Image (cartoon, grey):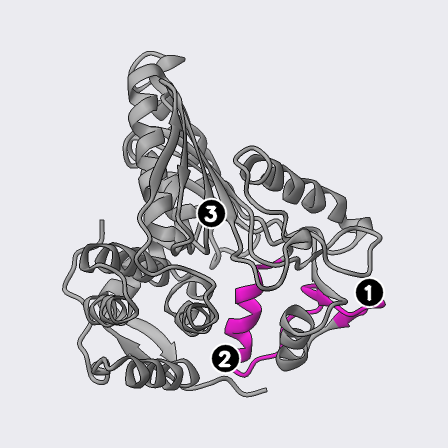
């Protein structure tokens, strides 16, 4: 299929528009601005599946009573190195960042901080929160449950687990932080949505039907993911012969840390009319609890340098480490703008019209912000 036309818009204008929509939906001005900043930061990193393309879904979910716009996170219990937050069924971005900041504060005090969240909702890209720990000189680990069963376990014909992402970040001194951000399915469901928005077929092995056969047409894949009870996303690895049991196991790891540990729901048992009660887990570790100052960072630099220096199979495609592609994309998009498919722009225009917000993205110059 032919791809959709793209327009590039500035990050500042996209943040302002997103914040205005969220405020029109009932968020406080502060919450709307914080959430919009995290949403657009996701687009800047090139994770288009979890950025502003989520707004149509958030609108539909809000109209169905699936999240509470004016929710405020609440501390439920706390110890010197742990805490439990209740997200009040709001969108998860702001609550998740608050949880990671709290975990980081505890880690900088006692060496380790672990914070879990219940009654949350979609929080965008997990890597945002792991990276926030690394930016404070800490190791960060994030796990989350997701709304709906989409992962088809190895040997199964129906989905049971969510895409259940895991993110891990670690700070270096000279290099960018190492930031791994991954779904435990072969691909995140929202990436299938991005392909569909762009009018492109998806690679075989991402989505399977009820008989385990690959589904490659974007529209048909969306049907299996969002409108049919059978079929769905493959576990990371794709098929048993290529290690799908490992992705299935990692999905369970995330489910355990972000589900029963904090009292969040198991999506396969949730009633359709219930709020999703998504759970998150955030861990922060201070390397200085284990090593003298800078020793950890220097050794990680040496490892990253060795990987970057590894001879590439194709000289035009140098060896990267996790976090490099997102950082490079961020620098490019700050200069040149964030690409939005025409179909997504049309959806955003309709959201603005229904919300009473002026749509001001056409012809906007790229953000003058300097890449970090």
**Neighbourhood count class around disc 3 (C-alpha, 10 Å): few under 14, some 14–19, many 20 upward:** many
| Cβ atoms under marks 1 and 2 closer than 8 Å | no
Residue 119: which numbered mark, if any? 3
Disc 3 versus disc 2: nearer the observer? 3
> Which mark sits nearer the N-terminus, 1 or 2?
2
Residue at x-position 59% and y-position 87%: 1
Disc 1 versus disc 3: nearer the observer? 3
Which secondary structure, mark 1?
A: loop
- Residue nearest the observer in this picture, 118 or 243: 118
Residue 197: which numbered mark, if any? 2
Tell me if 28 is positioned left or right of 227 in this view.
Answer: left
**Neighbourhood count class around disc 2 (C-alpha, 10 Å): few under 14, some 14–19, many 20 upward:** some
Q: Which residues are magenta?
A: 187-214
Residue at x-position 44% and y-position 62%: 50
Tell me if 140 is positioned left or right of 148 in this view.
Answer: left
Answer above or below: position of 56 versus 141: below
- Residue nearest the observer in this picture, 58 or 366: 58
**Neighbourhood count class around disc 1 (C-alpha, 10 Å): few under 14, some 14–19, many 20 upward:** some
Residue at x-position 57% and y-position 70%: 192
Q: Is residue 176 visible?
A: no
Q: Quadrant of residue 81?
A: top left
Q: Is residue 341 magenta?
A: no
Which secondary structure, mark 2?
A: helix
> Which mark sits nearer the N-terminus, 3 or 2?
3
Q: Position of residue 148 (x, y in %)?
A: 61, 59
- Residue at mark 1 to residue at mark 2: CA–CA distance: 25 Å
| Cβ atoms under marks 1 and 3 closer than 8 Å | no
Q: Is residue 190 magenta?
A: yes
> Which mark sits nearer the N-terminus, 1 or 3?
3
Task: Name the residue that disc number 1 marks.
Answer: 212
């Amino acid at each position: 299929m032919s791809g959709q036309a793209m327009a590039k818009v500035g990050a500042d204008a996209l943040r302002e528009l997103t914040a205005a929509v969220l405020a029109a939906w009932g968020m406080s001005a502060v919450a709307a601005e914080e959430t919009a900043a995290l949403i657009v930061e996701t687009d800047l990193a090139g994770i288009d599946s979890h950025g502003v393309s989520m707004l149509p879904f958030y609108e539909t979910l809000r109209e169905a009573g699936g999240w509470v716009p004016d929710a405020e996170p609440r501390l439920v219990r706390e110890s010197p190195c742990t805490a439990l937050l209740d997200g009040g069924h709001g969108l998860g971005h702001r609550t998740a960042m608050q949880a990671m900041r709290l975990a980081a504060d505890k880690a900088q005090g006692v060496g380790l901080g672990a914070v879990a969240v219940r009654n949350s909702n979609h929080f965008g890209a997990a890597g945002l929160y792991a990276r926030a720990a690394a930016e404070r000189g800490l190791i960060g680990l994030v796990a989350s449950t997701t709304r709906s069963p989409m992962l088809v376990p190895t040997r199964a014909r129906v989905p049971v687990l969510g895409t259940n992402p895991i993110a891990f970040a670690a700070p270096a001194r000279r290099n960018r932080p190492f930031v791994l951000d991954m779904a435990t399915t072969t691909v995140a469901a929202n990436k299938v949505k991005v392909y569909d928005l762009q009018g492109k077929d998806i690679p075989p092995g991402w989505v399977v039907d009820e008989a385990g056969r690959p589904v490659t047409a974007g529209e048909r894949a969306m049907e299996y993911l969002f409108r049919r009870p059978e079929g769905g996303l493959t576990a990371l690895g794709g098929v048993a012969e290529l290690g799908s049991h490992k992705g299935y196991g990692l999905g369970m790891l995330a489910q355990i840390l972000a589900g029963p540990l904090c009292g969040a729901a198991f999506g396969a048992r949730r009633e359709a009319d219930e709020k999703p009660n998504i759970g998150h887990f955030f861990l922060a570790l201070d390397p200085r609890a284990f090593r003298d100052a800078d020793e950890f960072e220097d050794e990680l630099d040496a490892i990253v340098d060795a990987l970057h220096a590894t001879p590439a199979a194709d000289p035009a495609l140098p060896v990267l480490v996790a976090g490099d592609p997102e950082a490079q994309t961020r620098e490019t998009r700050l200069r040149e703008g964030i690409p939005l498919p025409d179909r997504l722009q049309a959806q955003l225009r309709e959201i603005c019209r229904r919300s009473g917000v002026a749509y001001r993205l056409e012809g906007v110059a790229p953000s003058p912000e300097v890449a970090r």
